[in-house]
């Protein structure tokens, strides 16, 4: 057979194989395109998506929309040398730097030793967990997903699915019981008061979640927290019949895969501070919630990143109390390592380094390398707790096109559309500024910065 005839015979086969290969590529790539598009849609925060037109004509001039947005997900756009505020990458927020003392303790008193010895840690992924909570001579005991009261097996409240997890605790003279069950499409949970005889539900309707988790608790009967510890957590503050949603402080990053929380409450009323640690082994956490001298929780900081060792398996907290001037809170901290070693520390919470001005300065922002001149502000704002807005400012500076000199900082009016004019510039900078505070237990909690504008190119 000649080479020409062989080529003519094989060519249709290669053409069919090529067509088949292209078909396979399309079959694989089209679902991937739709998948990544849908993921892109999911991760965009609807609050940050501008509804402003990309181009508009004002007084005969064509203006182009530009935007800067910072959510503190990382520090890639922050000038760290010019910034002294604390950026918490777990809470995705900026605040004054936490002020604390961390000192080793050689020994515990009897009460402290008994407290830490009584803590029962769990394997978060396993339902086989033992716990016991005694009030005076009566004891509520958990063995896996069964509850016993004074050694008598209890009938649990009726649920609408397969029981997944049980949690127990107490506030003052009443027990708390958390049940989590699996239904089609997800998980549901309810928390109950238990008085030794009957169960009384706390939530009017069970909470729902896409993720399996465990309930954790802490506080006192008049004011306590319920935390659903899952990959994406939920949290609620219970004050008599008032339920406040705190879930924004317990999203994916703070939960770090999920853990069962235990809550330590310090103080009362407006001067309350909350500390949270994990009862799930190998998932240590140390989180603080503060109120800024208000009735509500205004901010959260992950102290784990500041004090935890790399080999810490569990961390537990016990309250020693506030000092006589109510200026700080003292905690005893127990850390257990991977090989069973135990160390104790005194953690004294002094609040925040808030007695001096704080700032975050961005790296330069531009319009793709070309010069431009600002003409209008569409929106300049910060997302901050309601107690701190007056003490937080946003400022603007830019580099001149000709001299490349940095202009003086200009304070930006927040929350309003205004005329905002510059000469031709190469880039601009945004500064977040906190005013100093006399109260060291007070810090703004800023989770977003937005600077939307129109410019000439």
Image: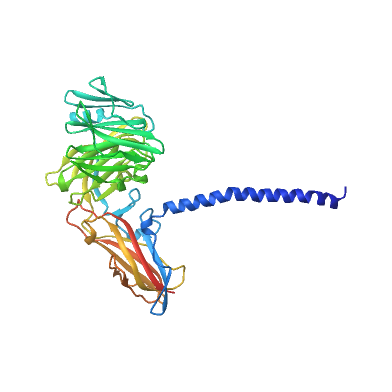
Q: Residue 100, position in %: x, y? A: 24, 47
Where's the C terminus, which quadrant? Answer: bottom left
Q: Quadrant of residue 347?
A: top left
Q: Residue 202, position in %: x, y? A: 24, 37
Determine the residue positioned at 52% across, 51% down: 34
Q: Residue 24, position in %: x, y? A: 63, 47
Residue sitting farthest toward the top: 151
* Closer to us: 416 or 198: 198
Determine the residue positioned at 66% across, 49% down: 21
Q: Quadrant of residue 337?
A: top left
* Closer to us: 21 or 263: 21
Q: Residue 19, position in %: x, y? A: 69, 51
Q: Quadrant of residue 115?
A: top left
* Closer to us: 310 or 165: 165
In the displayed structure, would residue 291 be above or below residue 158?
A: below
In the displayed structure, would residue 95 be above or below residue 345?
A: below
Residue sitting farthest toward the left: 324
- Whether residue 151 is visible to the viewer of this picture, yes or no, is yes
- Whether residue 315 is visible to the viewer of this picture, yes or no, is no
Determine the residue positioned at 65% across, 51% down: 22
Determine the residue positioned at 34% across, 31% down: 165
Q: Is residue 350 left or right of residue 367?
A: left
């Amino acid at each position: 057979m000649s080479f020409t005839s062989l080529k003519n015979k094989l060519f249709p086969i290669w053409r069919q194989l090529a067509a088949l290969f292209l078909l396979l590529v399309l079959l694989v790539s089209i679902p991937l395109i739709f998948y990544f598009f849908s993921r892109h849609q999911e991760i965009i925060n609807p609050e940050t998506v501008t509804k402003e037109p990309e181009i508009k004509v004002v007084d005969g001039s064509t203006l182009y929309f530009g935007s800067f947005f910072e959510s503190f997900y990382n520090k890639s756009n922050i000038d760290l040398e010019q910034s002294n505020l604390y950026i918490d990458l777990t809470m995705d927020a900026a605040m004054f730097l936490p002020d604390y003392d961390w000192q080793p303790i050689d020994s515990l008193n009897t009460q402290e030793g008994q407290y830490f010895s009584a803590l029962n840690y769990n394997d978060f992924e396993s339902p086989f967990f033992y716990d016991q909570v005694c009030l005076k001579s009566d004891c509520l005991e958990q063995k896996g997903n069964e509850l016993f009261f004074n050694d008598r097996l209890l009938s649990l409240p009726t649920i609408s699915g397969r029981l997944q997890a049980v949690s127990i605790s107490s506030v003052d003279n009443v027990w708390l019981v958390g049940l989590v069950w699996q239904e089609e499409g997800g998980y549901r949970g309810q928390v109950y008061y238990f008085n030794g005889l009957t169960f009384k539900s706390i939530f009017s309707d069970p909470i729902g979640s896409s993720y399996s988790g465990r309930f954790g608790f802490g506080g006192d009967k008049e004011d306590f927290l319920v935390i659903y510890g899952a990959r994406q957590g939920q949290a609620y503050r219970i004050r008599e019949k008032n339920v406040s949603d705190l879930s924004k402080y317990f999203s994916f990053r703070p939960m770090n895969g999920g853990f069962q929380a235990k809550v330590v409450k310090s103080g009362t009323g407006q001067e309350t501070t909350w500390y949270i640690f994990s009862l799930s082994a190998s998932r240590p956490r140390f989180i603080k919630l503060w109120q800024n001298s208000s009735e509500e929780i205004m901010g959260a900081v992950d102290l784990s990143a500041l004090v935890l060792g790399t080999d810490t398996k569990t961390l537990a907290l016990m309250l020693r109390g506030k000092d006589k001037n109510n200026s700080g809170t003292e905690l005893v901290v127990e850390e257990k390592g991977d090989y069973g070693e135990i160390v104790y520390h005194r953690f004294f919470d002094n609040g925040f380094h808030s007695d001096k001005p704080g700032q975050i300065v961005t790296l330069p922002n531009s319009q793709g390398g070309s010069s431009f001149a600002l003409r209008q502000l569409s929106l300049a704002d910060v997302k901050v707790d309601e107690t701190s807005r007056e003490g937080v400012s946003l400022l603007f500076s830019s580099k001149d096109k000709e001299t490349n000199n940095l202009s003086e900082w200009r304070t930006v009016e927040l929350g309003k559309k205004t005329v905002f004019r510059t000469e031709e510039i190469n880039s601009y900078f945004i500064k977040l500024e906190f005013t100093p505070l006399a109260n060291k237990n007070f810090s703004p909690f800023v989770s977003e910065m937005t600077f939307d504008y129109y410019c000439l190119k």
